[in-house]
Image: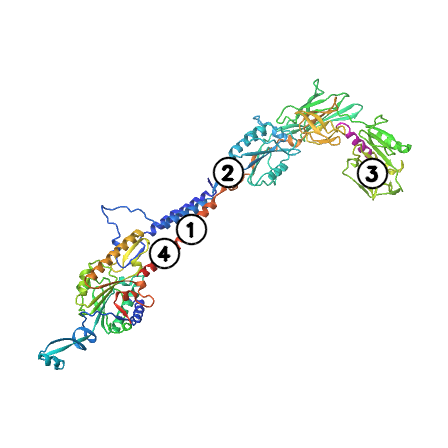
């Protein structure tokens, strides 16, 4: 049992006061009598000298003593431990900085697991729930007995480029009851203005230290089979003037680059390398430091995926306009036998699985020139960066199938039809090669977006050098329900919908996406998160310490009401006895008078 | 000590109550001056009492000529005497009779006035005596109680010693009544023997307050004797109260026994219940007063 107000023990002095009142009240209380003759006969004869009389107190004294003791006990606020200590929800930061080593070789992750072990032992929670604050959002870990939870935390891979502590804390608050506790284990202090409700403890185990990181690693296709490599290294507090860097083939072999980069005033060093055609997969490495995950990057070749286009237009002038725009993108293969995209002015006879994309140039009915206003669906990727302001468009009254992406007033100009089984069909209202659209910047941008959309639906990842935590699109055959991906941690199946899936891999390393039975598309995921690589703002400390009374209220249950109730009952009995004494005396007097 | 106003009220209340009663007089040994009550001796009433031989000097009008004619004896007829009985009312006027917090003073004055008035109703003469360290007659006590001079219960000594050693000249063959709380440590037999000596009747009225008859437990108290000033520290709990009650019972029993021994009547009265429903039930029950 605990007491919420130990200083209320001073109230015990009241009990001593009561004893004093009764003791001193028993002395020299004057009472005149007619004669002492009869009273002296009641006194015990004093034989053998002085003797000590036992303190004889009336029963009311003991009643008042018990009432006062109960009152003092109620004022002490006695609490007993709750039979169910509730559930402990652990919010664990899985960002990469949690795996940074300090001078002693320990990581915040290890220290957090140790702190969790201590917390479980102290609080005695019977249930522990773990929420992983992944960069992609809160993620529940597999339930485990409380004793196994610290070991489970040590096994969690901390490689996320960020955290979702706020969202995770909100989720934990939703899952927790008022008597449950929430423990946040991280390596940073809570954001300024963050209010931690009672029951939330925020423990940070980070250590401010210097670090170096690869903050940019890009492999860009420059044409004619050549590539360029752009690398950026950032110094977070080492204050060194130069930084060693090594670029070498991933499969081994002589280094393409090995030297020291000069650090500029902003703490950055950049290096650009031209790669000869046929350069294999590369690995970029920095010397070991506090955080290992940002010292290495794998860069696989990422040639642009060409889009085979067939132009089937009867209007020669219009065909030239279209072909010129396709050639300008540099990624269109014209007159391919199996095209990915068909630009035509005829409606396809049927759409089925495996048919290419179609861009149908539709002649307007009852054409009239419109100058806008143009209402465009800016959220659609086909219209990304396309501006129609100032254009004069030959619009018609004919209705376009599918989802209209562009209106001129109430006249549709551009729509995208998505058949359930076939490939998308883009409908564009065009009166001919003389349209102002083909002489405006909107036209090549629209063609580029169209080719990009076609390229994104080709099997494989949309990019081959990904940043950890950044969502990328993965495409496969339209009828495939999932695809096998080899990750650094093992194989993983990615669920597909309509042959597409968006996925944000977080673990750095080399991946392979299985396409078909014999072909696999490699891609790499690199950790490039400067906010996580900068270990200087990491902190160690505790926040959200509940006051003693609040913590006591959560772990114990007050029984002061019972003591108060007992005091009230005793006071009631006391009052009843005091009221009954005069009545009893009067009744006895009446009885005596009746007898007389 | 200024006279207690409750005494005046008690006298008036007792006078009003006494008008409903008459002092009950014993027939035997009743003596007094010529009055209206038949005495035990020969007198001048019309009631025949006895015959005796004529002696020179007897009133020839009482000579029974019929007897002389039949027996040639000179016989004189005697008649019952008519007397006026006397009441000696002794009132304990020690301080204990006006104990603080009790109606003893009021009750004592009521009893005294009631007895005096009842004696007047019975055509008795009366003398009221105030007994303390000595016994003094209350001036004008033959008058109506309302006309009695103010007095107070202020004697510092119980009347026991005075009743035993300094008795005044009681009227012989009169009725004597003592009103007191009898709370003094002495053998009552000699006192009652002396008080009853030459009296036609003696009634002892012990007047105690309810608190004196059955004290309530009040914890440890310093008991102060209002007459002597002595004190005793005592725990007045249920045990002590029970012992007190037993001691009081023994004390009353000793007085009652002594009263029976000398032909007196012992009447215990509680001050709070002297008057009930406009009557004096204790004095009625004891036979001291007769209702009219």
The residue to which callout 1 is attached is A571
Chain ID for label 1? A
Residues at marks 1 and 3 touching, judged by CB atoms closer than 8 Å = no
> In this figure, which residue is indicated by the disc labeled 4?
A584
Q: Which residue is mark 2?
A: A83
Both on one chain, marks 4 and 1?
A: yes
Q: Chain of mark 4?
A: A
Could you tell whether B290 is left or right of A71 in the image?
left
**Viewed as shown, does residue B59 lie left or right of A470?**
left
Q: Position of residue B21 (x, y in %)?
A: 28, 71
Q: What is the C-alpha distance between the residues marked 4 and 1?
A: 20 Å
Ranked by sequence position, the earlier of labels 4 and 1 is 1
Seen from the viewer's position, the closer of residues B117 and A468 is B117
In space, the residues marked 2 and 1 are separated at their CA atoms by 32 Å
| Among the 4 quarters of the image, the one containing residue A314 | top right
Secondary element at image label 3: loop
Q: Are marks 4 and 1 in contact (CB under 8 Å)?
A: no
Main SS of the magenta part reads: helix
Q: CA distance from mark 4 to mark 3?
A: 103 Å
Which residues, given as a range, are shown in magenta? A446-460
Give the vertical position of B206 relative to A241 (above or below): below
Front-lying residue, B268 or A324 = B268
Q: Earlier in the sequence, mark 2 or mark 3?
A: 2
Label 4 SS = helix
Label whose residue precedes the other's in the sequence (1 or 3): 3
Which residue is labeled 3 in the image? A401
Q: Position of residue A389 (x, y in %)?
A: 82, 41
């Amino acid at each position: 049992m605990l007491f919420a107000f130990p200083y209320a023990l001073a109230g015990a002095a009241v009990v001593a006061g009561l004893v004093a009142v009764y003791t001193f009240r028993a002395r020299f209380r004057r009472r005149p009598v007619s004669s002492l003759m009869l009273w002296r006969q009641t006194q015990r004869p004093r034989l053998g000298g002085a003797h000590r009389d036992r303190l004889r107190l009336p029963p009311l004294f003991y009643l008042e003593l018990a009432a006062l003791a109960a009152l003092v006990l109620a004022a002490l606020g006695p609490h007993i431990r709750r039979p169910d200590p509730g559930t402990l929800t652990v919010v664990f930061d899985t960002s990469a900085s949690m795996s940074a080593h300090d001078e002693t070789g320990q990581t915040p992750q290890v220290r957090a697991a140790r702190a969790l072990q201590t917390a479980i032992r102290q609080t005695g929670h019977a249930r522990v729930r773990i929420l992983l604050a992944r960069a992609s959002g809160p993620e529940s870990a597999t339930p485990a007995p409380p004793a196994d939870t610290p070991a489970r935390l040590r096994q969690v891979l901390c490689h996320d480029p960020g955290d979702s502590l706020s969202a995770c804390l909100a989720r934990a608050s939703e899952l927790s009851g008022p008597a449950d506790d929430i423990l946040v284990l991280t390596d940073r202090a809570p954001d300024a203005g963050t209010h931690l409700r009672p029951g939330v403890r925020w423990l940070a185990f980070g250590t401010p230290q210097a670090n170096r990181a690869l903050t940019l690693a890009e492999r860009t296709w420059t044409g004619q089979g050549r590539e360029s490599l752009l690398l950026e290294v950032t110094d977070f507090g080492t204050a060194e003037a130069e930084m060693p860097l090594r670029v070498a083939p991933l499969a081994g072999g002589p280094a393409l680059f090995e030297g020291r980069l000069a650090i500029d005033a902003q703490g950055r060093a950049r290096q650009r390398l031209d790669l000869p055609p046929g350069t294999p997969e590369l690995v970029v490495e920095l010397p070991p430091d506090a955080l290992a995950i940002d010292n290495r990057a794998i860069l696989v070749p990422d040639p642009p995926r060409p889009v085979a286009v067939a132009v089937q237009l009867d209007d020669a002038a219009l065909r030239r306009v279209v072909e010129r725009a396709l050639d300008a993108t540099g990624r269109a293969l014209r007159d391919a036998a199996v095209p990915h995209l068909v630009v035509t002015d005829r409606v396809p006879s049927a759409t089925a699985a495996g048919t290419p994309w179609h861009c149908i140039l539709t002649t307007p009915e009852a054409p009239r020139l419109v100058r806008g206003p143009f209402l465009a669906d800016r959220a659609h990727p086909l219209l990304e960066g396309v501006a129609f302001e100032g254009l004069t468009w030959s619009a018609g009254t004919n209705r376009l199938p599918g989802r209209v992406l562009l209106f001129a007033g109430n006249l549709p100009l551009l729509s995208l039809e998505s058949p359930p089984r076939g490939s998308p069909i883009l409908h564009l209202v065009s009166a001919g090669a003389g349209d102002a659209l083909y002489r405006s910047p909107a036209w090549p941008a629209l063609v580029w977006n169209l080719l990009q959309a076609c390229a994104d639906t080709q099997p494989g990842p949309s990019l081959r050098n990904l940043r950890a935590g950044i969502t990328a699109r993965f495409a496969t055959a339209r009828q495939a329900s999932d695809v096998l991906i080899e990750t650094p941690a093992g194989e993983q199946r990615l669920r597909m919908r309509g042959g597409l899936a968006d996925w944000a891999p977080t673990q750095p390393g080399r991946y392979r996406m299985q396409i078909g039975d014999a072909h696999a598309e490699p891609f790499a995921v690199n950790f490039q998160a400067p906010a996580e690589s900068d270990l200087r703002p990491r902190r160690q400390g505790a926040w959200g310490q509940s006051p003693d009374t609040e913590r006591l209220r959560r772990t114990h249950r007050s029984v002061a009401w019972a003591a108060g109730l007992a005091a009230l009952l005793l006071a009631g009995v006391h009052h009843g006895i005091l009221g009954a004494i005069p009545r009893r005396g009067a009744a006895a007097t009446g009885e005596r008078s009746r007898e007389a | 000590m200024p006279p207690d106003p409750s005494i005046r009220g008690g006298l008036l209340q007792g006078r009003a109550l006494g008008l409903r009663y008459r002092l009950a007089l014993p027939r035997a040994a009743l003596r007094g001056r010529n009055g209206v009550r038949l005495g035990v001796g020969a007198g001048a009433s019309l009631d025949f009492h006895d015959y005796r031989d004529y002696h020179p000097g007897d009133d020839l009008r009482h000579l029974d000529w019929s007897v002389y004619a039949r027996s040639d004896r000179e016989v004189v007829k005697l008649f019952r005497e008519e007397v006026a009985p006397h009441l000696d009312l002794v009132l304990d006027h020690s301080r204990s009779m006006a104990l603080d917090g009790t109606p003893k003073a009021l009750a004592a004055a009521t009893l005294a006035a009631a007895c005096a008035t009842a004696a007047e109703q019975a055509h008795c003469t009366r003398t009221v005596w105030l007994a303390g360290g000595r016994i003094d007659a209350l001036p004008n006590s033959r008058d109506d109680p309302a006309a009695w001079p103010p007095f107070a219960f202020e004697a510092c000594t119980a009347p026991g010693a005075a009743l035993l050693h300094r008795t005044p000249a009681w009227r012989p063959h009169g009725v004597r009544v003592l009103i007191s709380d009898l709370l003094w440590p002495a053998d009552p037999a000699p006192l009652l023997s002396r008080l009853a000596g030459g009296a036609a009747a003696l009634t002892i009225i012990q007047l105690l307050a309810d608190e004196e008859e059955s004290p309530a437990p009040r914890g440890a108290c310093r008991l102060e004797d209002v007459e002597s000033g002595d004190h005793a520290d005592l725990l007045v709990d249920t045990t002590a109260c029970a012992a007190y009650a037993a001691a009081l019972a023994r004390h009353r029993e000793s007085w009652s026994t002594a009263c029976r021994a000398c032909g007196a009547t012992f009447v215990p009265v509680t001050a709070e219940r002297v008057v009930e429903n406009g009557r004096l039930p204790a004095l009625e029950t004891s036979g001291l007063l007769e209702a009219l």
